[in-house]
Amino acid sequence: MHRTHGLRYKSRKLLTKKPREKGRPGISKWLYEYRVGDKVIINIDPTFITTAPHRRYQGKVGTIIGKRGKAYEIEIYVGSKRKIIITTPDHILPFNAQSVGTKPSAS
């Protein structure tokens, strides 16, 4: 029998929420204003699967280049290729370079 390789293939762990994260996210996620040129992290929310980008873009950092209705256009480079992802604010988080991978100094 032929195996299927759909969009959610091999993504059980990636596209499931932990028990304490289940349910709808807070209102601040929708109230955050993104502007053109902002850096964002793609973080797929499995609650809204119809607007989710492909799982290969999970965790990638991109730049917002425009807006289409309620969705945003995000530019991502995979290797040397330019990709444009169109997704809603449910699947993006603001990227703060200072807070990623650094610890606050104890002064």
Image (cartoon, helix red, strand yellow):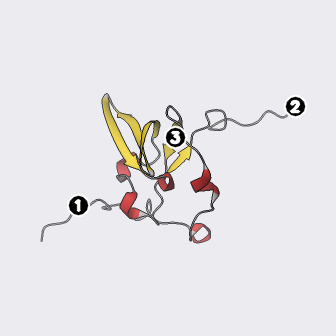
Q: From this view, report whether residue 68 is shown above or below residue 103.
A: below
Q: How crowded is mark 3: few (under 14 residues within 10 Å), some or many (20 or more)?
A: many
Asked if one can make out residue 11 in the rendered structure from this viewpoint, the answer is no
Separation of residues labelled 3 and 2 (CA atoms): 30 Å
Q: From this view, report whether residue 89 is shown above or below residue 41.
A: below
Contact (CB < 8 A) between labels 3 and 1?
no
Question: In the image, residue 46 lies at what x, y percent?
Answer: 45, 63
Question: In the image, residue 82 lies at what x, y percent?
Answer: 32, 32
Question: In the image, residue 19 lies at what x, y percent?
Answer: 58, 72
Q: Which of 98 and 94 lies nearest the eye of the viewer?
A: 94
Q: Quadrant of residue 22?
A: bottom right
Mark 3 or mark 2: whose residue is earlier in sequence:
3
Q: Quadrant of residue 34?
A: top right
Mark 3 or mark 1: whose residue is earlier in sequence:
1
Q: Which of 61 and 51 lies nearest the eye of the viewer?
A: 51
Q: Name the residue under label 2.
A: 107
Kind of residue sitting beneath label 2: Ser
Contact (CB < 8 A) between labels 1 and 2?
no
Q: Residue at x 63, y 60 (%)?
A: 27
Question: In the image, residue 17 lies at what x, y percent?
Answer: 52, 66
Q: Which of 63 and 65 lies nearest the eye of the viewer?
A: 65
Count of labels shown? 3
Q: Name the outermost residue toward the top.
A: 80
Kind of residue sitting beneath label 3: Val
Label 1 secondary element: loop
